[in-house]
Amino acid sequence: MEIDLDDLDPVAQQRLVLETAMLPQGTVLKDVIDEDVYRLAEERMGTLGVDVTALERFEPWFLAITALDLGMRKLGFQSERGVEQYVVGRARVTDRSRSSASRRSSFRWGCSTRFHASSNRRCSSRRWTELDEGAVVLDKMVASWRAGELESLSAELYGEFDGYPGLYEKLVTKRNSSWVPLLEGMLADGSRHLVVVGALHLVGPGNVIELLKKRGHEVERLH
């Protein structure tokens, strides 16, 4: 598994949020975003059933993540019904062993930077209008994923990193490279393995499939 779902400690996760997402003491959301953006955030969060003042002590990127999560749930995308949870459930039923390939530090770094609109923590109205396009974008990505259209999926996913220099390398490229020795060890141990990672690691520059091919491994894509 890309990350061990059984190893997620709710208390530790809450502490992580408080460490990385809270604004400095004495600062509230209105102090770090423009007035028109705040009004838009207030309106959009209201449609999702959340009073924005309940999040006034948090960084703008955390507000964006919260809005994204609530919006996706409204569209029927629920993390607890994801592929990872299904696979873990099946592994428990069949008594299969599981392990994790990633360190949580990578996810922490991603959490604390992914939705920063700029270095001074100001976010724009464009970010909020993008939420309106979420249903169309997600439907397109799901269709590409189901059909195995990696090129289309690659363009959609890779485009999400525009405007975030260095983030793709940190969250994707470096992790892909670190996985290759682990995968080669699995290939050499004589057992059968199922490796579950996000689609982003199988498409785009420096993807896992590309790296394995460069090292002489024969990779067959199944339909």
Image (spheres, rainbow, N blue to C red):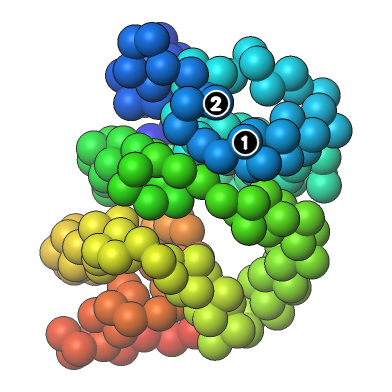
The image quadrant that residue 106 belongs to is: top left
Q: Compared to 156, does 190 lie above or below?
A: above
**Image-based side of 24 in relation to 199, left or right:** left
- Viewer-closest of 88 and 81: 81
Can see residue 49?
A: yes
> Within 10 Å of the Cα at label 2, are there few (<14), some (14-19), or many (20+) other Cα atoms?
some
Residue at the image position 71 percent from the left and 67 percent from the top: 137
Q: Which residue is mark 2?
A: 30
Q: Which residue is mark 1?
A: 35
Image spot of residue 104 (x, y percent): 28, 36
Q: Label 1 near label 2: C-beta < 8 Å?
A: yes
Secondary structure found at label 2: helix
Q: How many marks?
A: 2
Secondary structure found at label 1: helix
**Image-based side of 114 in relation to 40, left or right:** left
The image quadrant that residue 163 belongs to is: bottom left
- Viewer-closest of 202 and 184: 202
Q: Compared to 111, does 156 lie above or below?
A: below
